[in-house]
């Protein structure tokens, strides 16, 4: 019993005749009659009997029809779903991004994409760069967005944009009068930053060491927003990225660029061997850089 036989049987039941089924399916009456005969042979059942008015369904046909309706509509839904996958209208995309991009940028990208693809399910997560790359490599995540350049051979990567490293200062701090901050300016200042693996912190520390500027101390935190909160409370000056600064801009904080400029590339990672779905491809293509952060005068 194949799908075409089910379709013809349903058309006969719906129309009540061979002629009606042929009209519904736009095929000849002999083709309907032949398909019905083969179906009855396959099932070992008599589904219709001839009457003076045409044909009449047997009890077996009526019982079969109830089951066929459930199966048929399930197949129709399956066909529609498959068509949606093909046309990037349905499916699921699992994305993880570093925390700084998960607060505003990723939700903005997701909202725009969801509006254009209402049948798609988006699953959004936040992980540090190393975990994001690992999860993509293991196949648990479709798309990872991170600040490190992975050398894993099973991953493909595409640069999305750069984020700039900025110095966060409490309002009224002496360095707030400067247009930019150098390593010498930070000598002796307590530094608040993300952990040692953070690329912005690594580059700031390297610049200070290269300039021979003494590094008083570094307070480690796990989130850029926490860096800003601690700076607001007068615990030191912070190094954050431009996206964190854009989201966290308040009257209690001042942000200044560091010289020499710190630019860290942000990459999108995908599993190289995994055939990407059309909807994942569409989401990847929709990603745009965040709005630029403008330094207050």
Image (tube, rainbow, N blue to C red):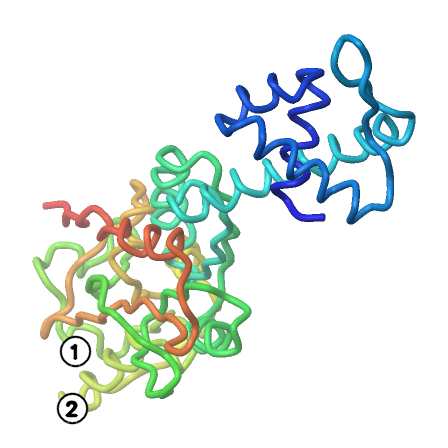
Query: Quadrant of the rendered structure where residue 237 is?
Result: bottom left
Give how far across and how far down residue 49 sits, in percent: 83, 23
- Point out the image quarter for the C terminus: top left
Residue at 40% across / 37% down in the picture? 117
Count numbered badges in the picture. 2
Query: Quadrant of the rendered structure where residue 4 is?
Result: top right
User: Looking at this rendering, what residue extends furthest in the front direction?
Assistant: 52
Judge from the rendering whether residue 78 lies leftward or rightward of residue 230; answer left or right.
right
Give how far across and how far down residue 171 sits, in percent: 27, 49
Instruction: Assign a secondary structure to mark 2.
Output: helix
Q: Is residue 221 above or below residue 74?
A: below
Binning the other alpha carbons within 10 Å of mark 2 as few (below 14), some (14 to 19) or many (20 upward) gives few
Residue at 41% across / 78% down in the picture? 273
Residue pointed to by mark 1: 183
Give how far across and how far down residue 178 sits, in percent: 10, 59
Residue at 35% across / 73% down in the picture? 190
Residue pointed to by mark 2: 210
Residue at 66% across / 48% down in the picture? 2
Q: Is residue 173 above or below residue 148?
A: above
Residue in front for this viewpoint, 87 or 138: 87
Residue in front for this viewpoint, 297 or 102: 102
Residue 166: tell me if it is visible.
no
What label sits on residue 143 in the rendered view? Answer: none
Residue in front for this viewpoint, 6 or 31: 31
Judge from the rendering whether residue 293 lies leftward or rightward of residue 252; answer left or right.
left
Q: Is residue 124 above or below residue 218?
A: above
**Circles 1 and 2: CB atoms closer than 8 Å:** yes
Sequence-wise first label, 1 or 2: 1
């Amino acid at each position: 019993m194949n799908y075409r036989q089910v379709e013809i049987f349903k058309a006969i039941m719906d129309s009540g005749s061979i002629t009606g089924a042929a009209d519904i399916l736009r095929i000849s009456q002999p083709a309907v009659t032949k398909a019905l005969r083969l179906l009855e042979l396959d099932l070992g059942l008599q589904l219709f009997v001839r009457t003076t008015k045409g044909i009449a369904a047997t009890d077996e046909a009526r019982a079969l029809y109830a089951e066929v309706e459930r199966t048929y509509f399930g197949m129709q839904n399956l066909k529609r779903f498959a068509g949606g996958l093909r046309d990037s209208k349905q499916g699921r995309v699992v994305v993880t991004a570093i925390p700084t991009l998960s607060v505003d940028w990723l939700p903005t990208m997701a909202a725009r994409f969801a509006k254009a693809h209402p049948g798609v399910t988006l699953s959004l997560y936040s992980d540090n760069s190393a975990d994001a790359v690992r999860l993509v490599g293991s196949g648990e995540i479709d798309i990872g967005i991170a600040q490190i350049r992975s050398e894993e051979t099973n991953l493909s990567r595409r640069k999305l944009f750069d984020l700039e490293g900025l110095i966060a200062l409490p309002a009224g701090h002496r360095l707030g009068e400067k247009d930019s901050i150098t390593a010498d300016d930070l000598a002796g200042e307590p530094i608040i930053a993300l952990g040692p693996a953070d690329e912005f912190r690594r580059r700031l520390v390297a610049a200070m060491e290269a300039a021979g500027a003494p590094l008083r101390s570094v307070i480690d935190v796990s989130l850029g927003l926490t860096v800003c909160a601690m700076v607001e409370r007068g615990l030191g000056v912070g190094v954050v990225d431009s996206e964190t600064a854009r989201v966290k801009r308040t009257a209690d904080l001042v942000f200044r660029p560091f010289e020499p400029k710190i630019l860290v590339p942000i990459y999108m990672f995908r599993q190289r061997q995994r055939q990407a779905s059309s909807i994942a491809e569409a989401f990847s293509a929709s990603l745009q850089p965040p709005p630029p952060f403008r330094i207050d005068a």
